[in-house]
Each structure stands twice: as C-alpha cells, then as structure tokens.
Image (cartoon, rainbow, N blue to C red):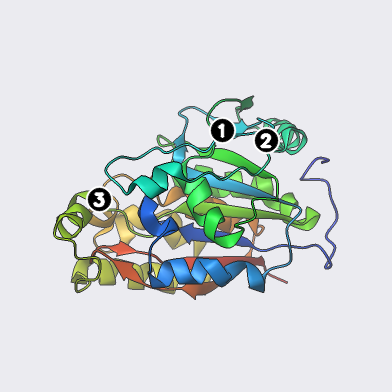
Amino acid sequence: MSDPSAVPATDATAMPSLFISHGSPDTAIADTSAAAFLRRAAGDLPRPKAIVVVSAHFEVSGGTAVLADAKPQTVHDFGGFQQELYEMQYPAPGDPGLATAIVDSLVAQGFHSQPVSGHGFDHGVWVPLKLMYPDADIPVVAVSVDPRAGPDYHLRLGHALAGLGRQGVLVIGSGSFTHNLREAFVALRQGNRDPAVQPWVTDFVDWMNGRLAAGDSTALLDYRRQAPFAERNHPTDEHLLPLYAAMGAAGEAFIARQLHDSNEFGVLSMAMWRFDAAA
C-alpha cells in the first residue's frame, strides 16, 4: 500500500478508528457482555482492506516498531488460563508492504520507527480480532506502544496513522480503559467476574467519558493529573496509551462515540469507543 499520509479522503472507503478494551485473555471464550459486543462489532463497519492494531502488549522503548512478517505467529503471552486458549490460533496474514509504508511514513514525520519480525500477534491483537473477524482473512499489522512515552506521543502517533482510514484500513487501539491488575486478581482468585464496581473506578470512568464525549484532548492528555484516581486505575499507563493512538488516527479533530460499557472483576472497565474525523 502507498504512503498512508498521502491518500485523499474517499467516503466509500473511509474507516473510523476504534479503542477496544481487550480485557482478560479468556475474553476470547468468555460469556460476557464485552465478548458479545465484539462478536457483533464488525457488522457495523465497512469491511476493512487491512487492520492495524496498536497493542498495549507490544512494548518497545525509544520508538515505534511495526510488525512486518508475512505470516505472524499467534503468541500466547499469558499463564494460568484454560487449555483451550493455548490451542487457539489466529492465522491472519501480515502485510509487509503496508508495514513498510507505515514505517516510511512515521520516519518522514519525525518518528524513530523500524520494521520488526518475530513478535507475532500478542493477545492484545488476536483476542479481539478472533471475536470480530473470526475468519482471520484480513491482513493485520501490529504497531507498538512506547511505555516510556506518554499520551501526547501516542496521540501524535495516531495523527501519523490518520491517512490509513482513508485507504479503508481499520486502526484499532487495543488496551484497557482501566487496568489495575493487582485488584482485579482478587476477584479473579475468588472466581467472581461480576462484583460491584468500585467507586474509584466509576469516578475515573465518568471523568474520561465526559472528556472524550466533549473532544477535550487537552484534559485527556493531562489525565494523570486531572482525572480522579488516575494512578489507582492505571498504576502504569501502557494499557491506556492505545486510546490516544485511536483518537489521533481519526485526525486532528475527532468525534467520539462510546460503543460499549461494561465492567469485569469490579475494577476493569471494558469501555470501547469509536472515533471519526470531525467534519
């Protein structure tokens, strides 16, 4: 595919960008409202020519890596789950040409970026795609997050990817709207996936929802200082960084629409959002 920053908009192929909370790896086989939503989510979208996933589980410090393998492996980067999960494969093809075009575009826009091989599809990539596009017949390219960089970097990364939507490429940021695993494991060990939502989670989610609906990028970029209980909901923020990439991929100005809202283990918000370019 050609330079993603140089393609004119065409209404027939324009795609939104999405932020998906991928949740626990067993979302792929779970009977939850989030899994049910993902199973029907593709029906509300044009069929993409390719999918680019900015995954919270693809961490590279000091730049942005782009998976360029033609046949990426399915990576089971987790432990302690049902055997069924370890037997799952997501054999979607990669797209080396698209990966190279993304790298070239990022470098031209001032990013340190390079193609990589061997990372495979981590569960931030394949778990939601297994539900959304189970036939695994659409090319997929994974893009890394930089855990040492913050929201502003990832918003700019999204801006650098914005041309992809005009080529009919679906950009997904795959992370988690809240991500305090220490507290989630308490409910997980008790076998309770649906306890009461903690107030400190609700306060944070309500603040984020309000800022997203208002298109308030300035406040969102400063979420760790402004949002209530930000550090408790995100002790580290790599799982929220894909949100900013998805925001940016809609363009300099975006319209945000919440697609799904549920909670698991009392502390993991499974909120999912759609971003379209503002007219």
**Residue, disc 1:** 64
Q: Which mark is residue 129?
A: none
Point out residue 151 in the picture as x, y percentages from the top left corner. 46, 48
Residue 228 in percent (x, y) is at: 26, 64
Check the image and report above or below for 172 versus 117: below
Q: Of the residues under marks 2 and 3, which one precedes in the sequence?
A: 2
Q: Which residue is mark 2?
A: 106
Q: Residues within 10 Å of mark 1 (few under 14, many from 20)?
A: many
Give residue 149's quadrant in the image: top left
Identify the residue shown where x is 65% and y is 73%.
44
Say above or below: 23 vs 38. Answer: above
- Quick one: label 2, few (<14), some, or many (20+) residues within 10 Å? many
Instruction: Identify the image quadrant of the C terminus.
Output: bottom right
Q: For marks 1 and 2, give the CA distance.
A: 9 Å
Tag 1 near tag 2, CB within 8 Å: yes
Q: Is residue 50 left or right of residue 249?
A: right
